Structures are given as structure tokens and as C-alpha cells.
Image (cartoon, rainbow, N blue to C red):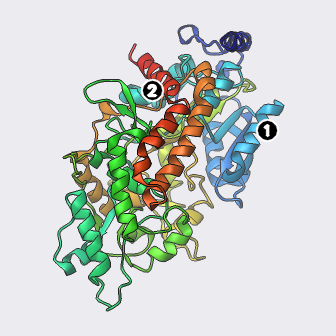
Amino acid sequence: MKKKRVYSLMATMMLAASILGACSDNKENKASTSGNPDNVNATGMPIAKDKIEVDGFAAKFFASQDWNSLMLWKEYEKMSNIHINWTTVQTEVLADKKNLLLAAGNYPEIFFASAFSRTDLLKYGQQGVFIPLNDYIDKYAPNFKKLLEEYPTVKQGITMADGNIYGFPTIYDPKFESLRVGAPWINQQWLDKLGLKSPETTEDLYKVLKAFKENDPNGNGQQDEQGWGSGYGIKQFIDYLRGSFGLNKQGTMNPNLDFKEGTEEFRFVPTTEEYKQLLEFLNKLYSEDLINKDVFTTEPQKFAAEAGKGTFGMLSEVDPKELFKLDGYVGAHVLEGPNGDRQYTAMSNGLGNLGMFVVTDKAKNPEAMVRWIDHLYGDEGAKMFFMGFKGVTYEEDAAGNVKYVDNITNNPDGKNLDQAISDYLTWPGGYYPGIVTQKYFQGAEAKENSINNAQQVMPYALKDEDIIPGLNFTLEENEQVSAILTDIQTYVDEVTASFITGKASFDKWDDYKKTIEKMGLEKYMKVAQAAYDRTKK
């Protein structure tokens, strides 16, 4: 009976979607005729022949920003002939605010930087609230279309189970290697002082961290040195070591899944013997105070104050020179693990959040808005979005190289770079649709140290064709497994922490596996396998 109710609900939703012009069959999906294509220029600027106004909702990082008076949007309006009436909320309350708008039916024409999940995209897409974008992309988004052709797994990742695309994502340029990969940072000065080489194996790492802690590499006569630290939780440690223990050879876009050796059949990573070995290794480091003891409770700001003292021999954040003003750190090596595995697998295909820009059924000019967002996926649009405006926020040399002006990088009011650039632009905080390229992104990952770090990781990195995008479930599948997966993930996270800290004995490993099986693991694995198998047809 439950299945019948689910199918009945889906049929009703699909019927409603068809009435609203949002067909769920990709082959029959046509661009809506309810817009005003005659007012849209096919190429170039302005986008709209006659000025149009659009109601938009967006998430912002800085509360003080007024998007309706921000230079980015004022200048883009002059270029495009499109005025956006922005309603903005801070990222901390985004989920509640957008859900309230949708529940009340009081939603805008577009959502920008609103981070809709796969589930939401499919749900509201099949209800007809979010319009399918396939044909609009084909006709009005040449920049985005080119990226999908260049990176087919990105297209696979944003295409829902019904064959439709409902959102424009964040894309991290796969060619921007130092944004995709990077090992932790190890203190080369300490290695030199102790006559040690950078670790090549997990056992080497243990010995080096122990030497850092016990042998006074900073030479102050006190045992104040610490081993390996992170302010972003245990995931930083696990991700670096996954490939050293033979895990996640299909990347980490589905972090709990990889293939059984020699097959395309999924296994559940957190119940494998290799994952147990990884946790045993981290337990060894934790029990000997070789990783920060507050790793499960600390916050980035609190950890930054501690890391800034220069007492850690290894750090998992971005380049310590950029983050903590600490010299002497270089990228660590990808490590060979106890079973001979040596690979860097904590990788994605460059696809970030899928639902960073959606067009709703209230849009009066969907064609124009697809052209409007497509500009941010091209070279000139990315330059405007991340760098701003020549002579105001950046300067450019004869070779076309750009950099922020001194007022941004050395702000006279004491603002850091994010704060200073936010007087003009919206990208700080990381919530945006568009493409992040090395040419126009000037964060720590674009600096020489990070580039060098990535270059020595890349020989051990996964091939792009081996990385599986995040799985897209049907509404029925999601209903079957969402609660199961949430419960399992919560349990895995709790017990992972207990194993590492020693609160749980590894003698209880089989009990841990049996508990996960009882929570519905088999059903989840069947659904996940079916979702993957669909992508191969």
C-alpha cells in the first residue's frame, strides 16, 4: 500500500508539473513560452532590449551588505538592462527563510546563492515551482553549456533522476589543481632541526609527529610542541588518510561509498576493514597526544588562536603562511599505508552545491535570467564577479594579469581582504553560482605555496574519470532511504569519534557493523546501487 501511495503522489505531482509547463520527461522538455523571448538579445550586452525588473532572494555572508546598492549589481544592471529587487538573509538563517517562502507560496522569481539540495531541486522541480532548465541552457546559456560539454560528469551530477536540470551550481574549475587537492602542511624547519625527512608512510608520520612532540624542535627548552592539528574536525585527518588505507577510490562526493575491488558494486566504506585500520591509526595518534585533543569540539576561530602560536608541527588547513602568518611550512607527501596503498582520494569532480541559482514558475522573463546567470560562467563574468572593476577593485598589467588594488589588500581601515572586497562584491563566504578559476580567484589556494603543494599531490590523485558525482535519487527512493541514511550517518559519526578517542574498544567493531545493518543499510545500498546503475544506461 505504501508504494501505491508513493506512486500516486508522484503521479499527482507530475500532472501538476505538466500543467505548469514543467514536464518531467527530459526528451519532451521545451523552453517555456510564458516568458518574453522577443525582449532578449541573443548575444552580447544588454541582455534585455527593454529594461526589466526581477524579484530575487539571496543569502549573504556579511549582514551589513545592502545588495540593492552594491556596486556589483548596479554595474551589472547597467550592462544587462536587468534590475534585481533583492531580498537577502544571512547564511545562518537561509534554510529556514527559504523554506518559509516556499511553504507560503510567497517565493520570488529567482533564488540566488540559496544552496538548494538535490532533494529540494527534484521536489520543487516536479511540483512545478522550479522550472526545468535544459532547453533554456541549450538556447540561452552558451558559457554554461560549454562547461557541461567539457566536463560531462558535472552534467551528470546536476541532472536529476527525472532527466531535468533545475539549478545552476558552483563549479570549481577542475584545472585549478590547488583548489581540488592538497596535503596537510608540515614544518620543514622542524624536520631540518631534527635531521628528519618528510614522512613517506603512515608509520613515518607517527615517528615524525612523536619526534616533534618530544625533541624540542623549536629549541626553546620547553616541551610545548604539538603534533598535527586542525580546527575543522576529524574529517580533515580522515580525508588525508583515506587513500593511504585503500578507501574512496571513486572520490568523496559519495563519501560512504566506493567499489568493491574489480567491480562496479558499492561497498559501505565505514564498515570496511580498511576503515577500521584507519581509525586504529588515528586512535594511536590521539592516545599519544599527537593530534589536538579538542579536535572534536574546537571551532576554527578558537583553533586559529592556538595554531598562531606556531606550536604545531603539521596543520590541515590552508597554507599557514596565509592563514596564521607562519613561515616554514611545506606540503606533506601523500603517504603509503600499511597495505601498500598510496593515493589521494578526497576529491570531487569540481562540482559544488547544485542549487545555487534557480528560476521559479513566477519568473516573467526566464530566458533573460538564464542569460543573466550564464554570464558568470564565462571569462568576463567570472572576472567581474571575483575581481570587480578595473581601477576600483583591481588593476591589470599589459599581459592581462589582474590583482586587487592596495586598498583591498592593505585596507586603511584595517579590514581584511574579505571585508574590504565585500564593500563591492558578494563572493566572500563561498555562497554563489558560477565558476571558480585560478585566473580570477586570489585566495590562499592560488598562491605559490599551495600550487607547489598540489603539484606534488597530483601524481597520486584520482583520475577524473574514476570520480563518481553525487548520486541523484528519485523522490520515491529518497523517501525510502533519507531517514535511514540520516540515522546511520549520525551513528557512524558518533562511533567514529568513540573509536578514535578510546571511549569504545575495537573489540566492539562487529557489534558496530551489526547495528548499522539493523538500521537499514541493505535497503540504502540497493537504492544507491540503482541510482548509480541508471547513470550507466
Residue to which mark 2 is pinned = 155
Residue at image location 47% in from the left, 51% down from the top? 496
Amino acid at dot 1: Leu
> Where's residue 502, x and y in %?
44, 60
Q: Earlier in the sequence, mark 1 or mark 2?
A: 1
Q: Is residue 338 above or below residue 80?
A: below
At 50% from the left edge and 45% from the top edge, which residue is drawn? 492
Amino acid type of the residue tagged 2 in the rendering: Lys
Image x and y of residue 169, in percent: 53, 36
The single residue placed furthest to the bottom in the displayed view is 221
Q: Is residue 91 visible?
A: yes
Residue at 60%, 52% (x, y): give it: 426
Mark 1 lies on residue: 100
Residue 398 at least partly seen: no
Nearer-the-camera pick, 480 or 28:
480
Placement of the C terminus among the 4 image quadrants: top left
- Are circles 1 and 2 on residues that touch, CB within 8 Å? no
Task: Name the side, left or right, on which 514 lies relative to 213.
Answer: right
Left of 491 or right of it: where is 277? Answer: left
Instruction: Determine the image quadrant of residue 396.
Output: bottom left
Q: Say few, some or many: other residues with alpha carbon within 10 Å of mark 1 (under 14 / 14 to 19 / 20 or more).
A: few
Mark 2, Cα crowd under 10 Å, few <14 / some 14-19 / many 20+, is some
- Of the two numbered discs 1 and 2 in the rendering, the one whose residue sits closer to the viewer: 1
State the residue at coordinates (29%, 24%): 263
Residue 200 vs residue 223: left or right? left
Quarter containing the N terminus = top right
When asked about the image quadrant of residue 246, the answer is top left
> x%, y% of residue 121?
62, 28
